Image (cartoon, rainbow, N blue to C red):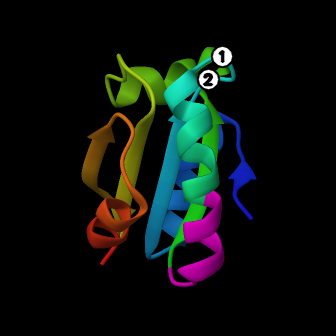
Amino acid sequence: MVKEIKDIEYEKLVKENKKVLIDCYASWCGPCKMLSPIIDKLAEEIKDVKFYKVDVDNAEKITSDFDIMSIPTLLIFEDGKLKEKVVGLRSKSELEELLK
């Protein structure tokens, strides 16, 4: 399951976990809705990555910290540092490759 978080929580979660994916989305965004079940499936299958989502309409800190201008945006962290920023809809296989 992908946990919804407040954007002020992300720094703590990134530091506490080895690998983290944060799905930055909006409820009105069509591509975000298409990406959501893919992220849910990956969260079930990949146990060494923690999956979270943040609604950008209520996330001034994370959108500012990572200059998020388009959604969906995926932020992938490893060992507390941003490893990858992915903008737009991606396939399950593309995301699996990024999370290796």
In the image shown, does 87 or 16 lie closer to the viewer?
Answer: 87
Look at discs 1 and 2 and give the one toward the viewer.
1
Which residue is rendered at x = 62% and y = 67% of the image? 41
Q: Position of residue 55 (x, y in %)?
A: 64, 28
Secondary element at image label 1: loop
Label annotation for residue 26: 2
> Considering the numbered disc 2 on the image, is that residue within a helix, a strand or a loop?
loop
Q: Can I make out residue 80 in this image?
A: no
Q: Residue at x 44, y 25 (%)?
A: 71
Q: CA distance from mark 1 to mark 2?
A: 5 Å
Q: Quadrant of residue 2?
A: bottom right
**In the picture provided, is 23 more to the left or to the right than 75?**
right
Q: Answer above or below: position of 40 versus 5.
A: below
Query: Are dots 1 and 2 in contact, CB under 8 Å?
Result: yes
Span colored in magenta = 40-48
25 vs 74, left or right, is: right
Q: Can you say which quadrant of the picture contains the C terminus?
A: bottom left
User: Dot 2, crowdedness within 10 Å: few (<14), some or many (≥20)?
Assistant: some
Task: Please name the amino acid that badge 2 sits on.
Answer: Ala
Q: Quadrant of residue 16?
A: bottom right
Q: Is residue 98 found inside the magenta-colored segment of the image?
A: no
Q: Is residue 74 above or below residue 26?
A: below
Judging depth in this view, the residue of 26 and 6 nearest the camera is 26
Mark number displayed over residue 19: none
Q: Which residue position is annotated with label 1? A: 28
Q: Residue at x 37, y 23 (%)?
A: 68
Q: Position of residue 89 (x, y in %)?
A: 39, 39
